[in-house]
Amino acid sequence: MRPFSLALLSAQSLCEFGTKHGALDYKYIEVGLVPDIDITGSVPPRYVRQEVAAATMTTQQMQMEQMGQFRITVWEEENFQGKRCEFMQECRNIMERGFRKIRSIKVENGSFVGFEYPEFQGQQFILEKGDYPRYEAWSGNSGYRTEHLLSFRPIKCANHSDSKVTLYECDDLQGRKFEICDDYPSLQAMGWCSKDVPSIKVNSGAWVAYQFPGYRGYQYILERDRREGEYRNYNEYSTQAHTPQIQSIRRIQQ
């Protein structure tokens, strides 16, 4: 491999190269990897290792790196068998990709929420980084279990170190309120006097609320960047929410 100097190529030239050739493949846009290009515009079929200063990164490079923040692989059968497909963004209907259903999952980067039905409808299931070989892995101790998922999307605002949520005792963010910034396996144990939480405001981050103590029962994904973080009625927690009952809550990992 021959030496390469970024001094020979401006950020503008690199951006123009990427636009012209479409050659800035994501797997090469990591710290220390840049295309082996010369200023004449020829593209030798090899890459060289080089430390890249943040100041030299183009908008296109940064966008491509950001795309890798979320990565999920889904399989049509349990235990990572059958047809598979990798995604770095949402999927509104897996059947449009030639799948009958999703029965096993691996989340490599970021966090996702999976849904029972297409178009992000039905029961919700939190999918944080890890392996989900069968439906029990994502259903957990849920009182409602589904053996497959049909749509999913990334949770973009999750920030485990900076999360805050406010619980209200009445609809429309009214009545007594309580702010929390930590995980609570039992809201009643920390002082909330009811089994119900009629409305919620997510001040920062993303949370998953559960119907029962100990992170059990129906799951409700609550995000700062949806509905402006305001869930004014329990019907807004989920398309399948039938009760305001919430007895445990935790921050979503990213």
Image (tube, rainbow, N blue to C red):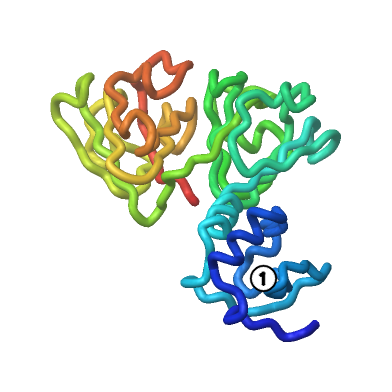
Most extreme residue toward the top, as rendered? 242
Residue at 36% across, 31% down = 247
State which quadrant residue 139 falls in.
top right
134 relative to 12, above or below: above
Percent position (x, y) of residue 19?
Answer: 64, 54
Q: Element at badge 1?
A: strand
Residue at 85% across, 34% down = 82
Judge by depth and name the residue closer to the eye, 224 or 38.
38
Quadrant where the N terminus lies?
A: bottom right
In the rendered structure, the answer to whether residue 179 lies left or right of residue 213 reads: left
155 relative to 1, above or below: above
For label 1, count other residues whose C-alpha is less than 10 Å away and answer few (under 14), some (14-19) or many (20+). some
Percent position (x, y) of residue 57?
Answer: 53, 67
Most extreme residue toward the bottom, as rendered? 3
In the rendered structure, the answer to whether residue 107 lies left or right of residue 232 reads: right
State which quadrant residue 52 falls in.
bottom right
Q: Determine which residue is flagged by label 1.
A: 34
Percent position (x, y) of residue 239?
Answer: 46, 17
92 relative to 54, above or below: above
Most extreme residue toward the right, as rendered? 82
Judge by depth and name the residue closer to the eye, 215 or 135.
135
37 relative to 252, above or below: below
Most extreme residue toward the left, as rendered? 175
**Does any portion of residue 139 appear in the rendered image?**
no
Judge by depth and name the residue closer to the eye, 220 or 142.
220
Amino acid tagged 1: Val
